[in-house]
Image (cartoon, helix red, strand yellow):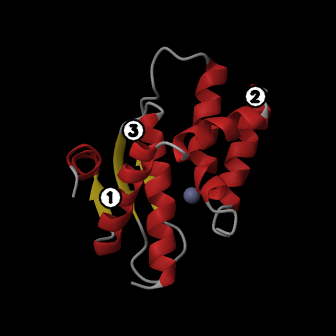
Amino acid sequence: MNEIHARTSRHEALHCVAAYWLGWQVDAVSRPHAGGLHGATHLSKTPPSGLEPRELGLRKAAVFLIPAIDDPTDDTCEEDINEADILVRLSGIPLSKVWAAAQALLVDPSFREQVRRVEYALHETTLLSGAEIRHLMFHGE
Ligand SMILES: [Zn+2]
């Protein structure tokens, strides 16, 4: 396991579990096969229902920003930060609220445990399905 794989696994696991906690279904999560920096978290097309547009924007921005908040030295986050920036501007949410929403997840021990399980599974493979992710999150490894 090289350092780039470890970083990408953690990065995508954070997007994935945060999206779940904030109301999205996650269809799949992947990391690149060889040495690339960018994995991908595939969210279901249906956003969480019953939310105000501002709340939806806030949650989406938190999902984008959480790897950068968890590890400010993660230099693969530029695209995520741009996406979050657009959402924050469009919905007029203070960035501090997005930050607080992501922090609230990061300090939660059950959140961290679920991230760890998805992260470790992504070390071993390059693609996890929605069913595999749910199994890891709710039933352990
Ligand atoms: Zn990312």
Find out whether the residues at labels 2 and 3 contact each other: C-beta distance under 8 Å: no
- Residue situated in front as seen by the camera: 30 or 2: 2
Asked if 42 appears above or below 31 in the picture, the reply is above
Image quadrant occupied by the C terminus = bottom left
Q: Which residue is mark 2?
A: 93
Residue drawn where x is 48% and y is 43% of the image = 18
Q: Which residue is mark 1?
A: 117
Where in the figure is residue 31, as x and y percent of width and height?
A: 42, 68
Q: Which amino acid lies under the numbered mark 2 shown in the image of this protein?
A: Ile
Q: CA distance from mark 3 to mark 1?
A: 21 Å
Residue 58 is situated, as x and y percent measured from the top left of the image, at: 64, 31
Q: Which percent across, then down, holds residue 4?
A: 51, 79
Count residues near mark 2 (Cα–Cα under 10 Å), then give few for <14, some for 14-19, many for 20+: some
Q: CA distance from mark 2 to mark 3?
A: 24 Å
Q: Element under label 2?
A: loop
- Mark 1 or 2, nearer chain start: 2
Q: Which amino acid type corresponds to the residue marked 1 in the rendered image?
A: Arg
Disc 3 designates what residue? 44
**Location of ligand 1 given as a quarter of the image:** bottom right
Instruction: Please state which of the two labelled residues, at mark 1 or mark 2, is closer to the viewer.
Output: 1
User: For the residue carrying disc 1, how many other residues have a C-alpha within 10 Å: few (<14), some (14-19), or many (20+)?
Assistant: many
Is residue 58 positioned above or below 5 on the image? above
